[in-house]
Image: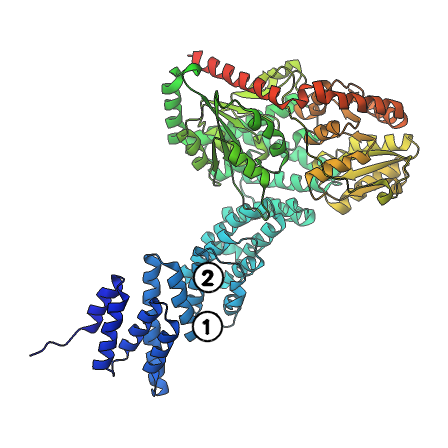
């Protein structure tokens, strides 16, 4: 007796083996032998589809459906869909994403509103890297998710696709709409919030407003369903993103909400800092700032006295920058450094508790490797920053990368908290290519520290200090035997940092008394550059309705630096110089900035129509070119310009600066000393006022200073990137010698 043929079993062997012609022959024989078995038609059509014969596949499926009653067609369609679904899943495993996508397109033709299939199509488009962002609307995904009543779908798949979309195309408008439409379907709220927070952080550098819009989605969640710590986390970031996008009122409001929700002292300290950040950035809230800073310092002192040792990593990272605004408010170096050092020490003590295993492992190897001397190998220098690109740090540090001696040093670049950008960053690409090794890291300080440790970096340079809290945790883990702070801000105060790079001028001689790091003074200057690129100016006096014979003062700084005492001195200068105008530019709340300066002008008898508020320029090169409109630049105090001062001096424009005691009050001083210009250096408010008036009235003196500045390009160490690189390299070698010789 002849055994019945198991067509499906035999054909499936050929299918799995990729022998589609043999599988096709078997299914054709099966249909001829058993035409009433509809599954043969479904599988034959699938084989034809796998062979690229789409029209033939569709004809075969239609033939199988022919003459069926509606109930039968509905049943057969469900069977066909199961066959296609199974094969689409198999093609993903192979993996053959293009074929899986093609199969799911046919499923879509059969069931255009199958939300799970549409989600799969989105995910496959991303895997194929042909996703544009328009598909979410074109396929009707968002419309289906927003329909009433809620549709049934695979919640795990939804979250997977949402994550893929946000990773691949976070800047596309549909991504925000998709995330919003997912809200009613979310069951794991904390996972969803974490995903949205990470997305917002990755885009915040170039699109803080969009980052804030993403986080606003989280505010639609039921606050009772979230732990307070998770709610505080996304509100903390939301306040920052609002402030970064200059939506200061919203940022201040959210920061104050954080403070009201905070139950622990450390959370109150972090929220208080965020309120300060908003008030300082907006400009014009000075009375409130003065009241808040007293409370803030008091809370910091209580926290320092308590010395908690059970703080989480998230809390520690948030606490690092809570002393950030003290030098902007007061030039009290000893007091500011003391509280900075104490907070940094508290944070590191907690890192050594929750990161004990990593800290101990690193320490043991540092001790074992101590015997290797400088003559036996190249020194590995690692630079850690989130600003190695089109940022002030990026513009200034490039000359050191350019001139490093690759015969003596291996240069590693570590891009901390690497963010997605809406536009390409050519300078970031340059750093990636210039380094011997470039690592674009995650937002995990532990992962970054481990990478640095595995790379066996000898000297790790911190370019950001407390301007990036994540960096501080990396350095607190001590992944390199020698750690140094340079360039980005004042010293962090971390006990794990060995040295702080300075020069003969930027810190007074007695500064070591209140620094926890060893101050390493370079011979001339702590920064050296070969110059700056410039574009064609886009700003002219006639555009601003300023007479050609007028004296033009200028100040281009962020809102944080607009101390009212210095701003009042600037108004006094303008008042004393006839036919003078004051140009004001920099990141701040537009209306509050105007109100701030207009009120000061009126109090000092200056007509408000002598003030001009300038928008930001589209590029740094245009900004530098437009500085040429100014006759005199008036610096800020107690926090001077740094990059802005360098740009002013490079453009040969006289500068008036007020020198103080702290690092931030001596940046312009060291730069002017290094170009050989003392005219404009003021040690008191009275001298600042006198120099401002004198330079405004004395055109000959301005010309003499401009000539000195032009000549300094030939001789000044400030404009000699190669010499500066040699001096930094000498410092690195001496640091290593000291380390190797120590017990």
Can the viewer see residue 320 in this picture?
A: yes
SS class of the residue under badge 1?
Answer: loop
Above or below, comparing residue 30 to residue 227 in the picture: below
Q: Earlier in the sequence, mark 1 or mark 2?
A: 1
The label on residue 553 is none
Quadrant location of the N terminus in the rendered image: bottom left
On the picture, is 257 further left or further right than 55?
right
Residue tagged 1? 113
Q: Residues within 10 Å of mark 1 (few under 14, many from 20)?
A: some
Hey, which quadrant is residue 582 in on the image?
A: top right
Q: Position of residue 81 (x, y in %)?
A: 35, 72
Q: Position of residue 726 (x, y in %)?
A: 57, 18
Hey, which quadrant is residue 677 in on the image?
A: top right
Q: Nearer the viewer, residue 681 or 127?
A: 127
SS class of the residue under badge 2?
Answer: helix
Above or below, comparing residue 678 to residue 558 in the picture: above
Quadrant location of the C terminus in the rendered image: top left
Hey, which quadrant is residue 456 in on the image?
A: top left
**What sort of colour scheme is used for the picture?**
rainbow
Can the viewer see residue 305 in this picture?
A: no
Q: Residues within 10 Å of mark 2 (few under 14, many from 20)?
A: many
Q: Position of residue 107 (x, y in %)?
A: 40, 71
At a point 61% along the width and 38% down the height, the residue shown is: 390
Q: Nearer the viewer, residue 318 or 84?
A: 84
Which is more foreground, mark 1 or mark 2?
A: 2
Above or below, comparing residue 60 to residue 519 in the picture: below
Q: Position of residue 271 (x, y in %)?
A: 59, 41
Residue tagged 2? 122
The reply to whether the C-beta atoms of the residues labelled 1 and 2 are less than 8 Å apart is no
At a point 34% along the width and 82% down the height, the residue shown is: 63
């Amino acid at each position: 007796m002849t055994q019945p043929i198991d067509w499906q079993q035999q054909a499936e062997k050929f299918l799995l083996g990729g022998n589609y012609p043999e599988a096709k022959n078997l299914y054709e024989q099966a249909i001829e032998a058993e035409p009433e078995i509809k599954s043969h038609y479904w599988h034959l059509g699938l084989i034809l589809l796998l062979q690229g014969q789409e029209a033939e596949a569709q004809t075969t499926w239609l033939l199988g459906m022919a003459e069926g009653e509606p109930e039968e067609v509905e049943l057969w369609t469900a069977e066909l869909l199961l066959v296609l679904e199974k094969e689409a899943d198999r093609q993903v495993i192979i993996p053959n994403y293009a074929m899986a996508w093609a199969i799911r397109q046919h499923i879509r033709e059969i069931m255009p509103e199958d939300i799970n299939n549409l989600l799969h199509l989105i995910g496959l488009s991303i895997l194929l890297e042909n996703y544009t962002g328009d598909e979410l609307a074109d396929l009707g995904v968002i419309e289906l998710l927003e329909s009433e009543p809620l549709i049934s779908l695979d919640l795990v798949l939804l979250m997977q696709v949402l994550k893929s979309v946000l990773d691949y195309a976070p800047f596309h408008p549909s991504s925000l709409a998709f995330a919003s439409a997912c809200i009613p379907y979310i069951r794991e709220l904390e996972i969803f919030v974490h995903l949205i927070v990470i997305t917002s952080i990755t885009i915040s550098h170039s699109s803080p407003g969009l980052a804030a819009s993403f986080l606003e989605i989280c505010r639609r969640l039921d606050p009772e369903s979230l732990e307070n710590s998770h709610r505080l986390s996304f509100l903390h970031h939301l306040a920052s993103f609002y402030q970064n996008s200059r939506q200061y009122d919203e940022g201040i409001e959210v920061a104050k909400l954080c403070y009201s929700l905070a139950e622990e002292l450390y959370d109150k300290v972090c929220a208080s800092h965020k309120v300060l950040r908003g008030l300082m950035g907006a400009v014009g809230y000075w009375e409130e700032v003065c009241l808040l800073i007293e409370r803030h310092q008091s809370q910091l002192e209580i926290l320092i006295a308590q010395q908690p040792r059970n703080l989480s990593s998230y809390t520690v990272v948030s606490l690092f920058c809570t002393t950030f605004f003290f030098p902007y408010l007061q030039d009290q170096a000893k007091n500011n450094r003391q509280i900075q050092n104490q907070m940094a020490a508290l944070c590191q003590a907690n890192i050594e508790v929750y990161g004990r295993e990593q800290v101990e492992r690193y320490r043991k190897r540092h001790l074992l490797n101590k015997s290797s001397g400088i003559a036996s190998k190249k020194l590995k220098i690692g630079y850690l920053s989130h600003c190695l690109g089109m940022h002030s740090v990026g513009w200034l540090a490039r000359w050191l990368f350019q001139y490093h001696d690759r015969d003596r040093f291996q240069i590693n670049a570590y891009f901390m908290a690497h963010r997605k950008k809406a536009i390409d960053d050519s300078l970031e690409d340059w750093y990636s290519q210039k380094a011997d090794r470039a690592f674009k890291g995650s937002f995990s300080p532990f992962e970054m520290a481990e990478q640095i440790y595995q790379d066996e970096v000898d000297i790790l340079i911190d370019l950001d200090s407390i301007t990036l809290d994540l960096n501080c945790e990396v350095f607190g883990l001590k992944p390199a035997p020698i750690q140094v702070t340079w360039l980005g801000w004042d010293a962090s105060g971390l006990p794990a940092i060995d040295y702080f790079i300075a020069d003969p001028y930027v810190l007074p001689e007695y500064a070591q008394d209140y620094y926890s790091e060893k101050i390493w003074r370079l011979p001339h200057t702590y920064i050296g550059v070969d110059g700056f690129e410039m574009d064609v100016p886009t700003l002219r006096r006639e555009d601003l309705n300023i007479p050609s014979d007028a004296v033009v003062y200028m100040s281009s700084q962020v809102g944080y630096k607009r101390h009212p005492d210095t701003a009042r001195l600037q108004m006094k200068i303008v008042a004393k110089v006839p036919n003078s105008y004051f140009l004001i530019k920099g990141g701040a709340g537009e209306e509050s900035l105007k109100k701030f300066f207009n009120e000061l002008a009126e109090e000092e008898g200056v007509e408000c129509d002598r003030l001009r508020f300038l928008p930001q320029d589209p590029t740094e090169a245009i900004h530098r070119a437009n500085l040429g409109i100014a006759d005199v630049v008036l610096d800020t105090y107690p926090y001077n310009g740094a990059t802005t001062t360098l740009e002013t001096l490079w453009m040969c424009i006289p500068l008036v600066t007020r020198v103080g005691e702290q690092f931030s009050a001596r940046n312009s001083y060291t730069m002017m000393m290094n170009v050989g210009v003392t005219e404009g250096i003021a040690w008191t408010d009275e001298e600042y006022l006198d120099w401002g008036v004198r330079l405004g009235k004395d055109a000959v003196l301005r010309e003499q200073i401009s000539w000195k500045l032009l000549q300094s390009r030939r001789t000044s160490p400030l404009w000699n990137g190669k010499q500066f690189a040699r001096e930094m390299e000498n410092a690195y070698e001496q640091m290593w010698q000291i380390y190797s010789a120590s017990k």
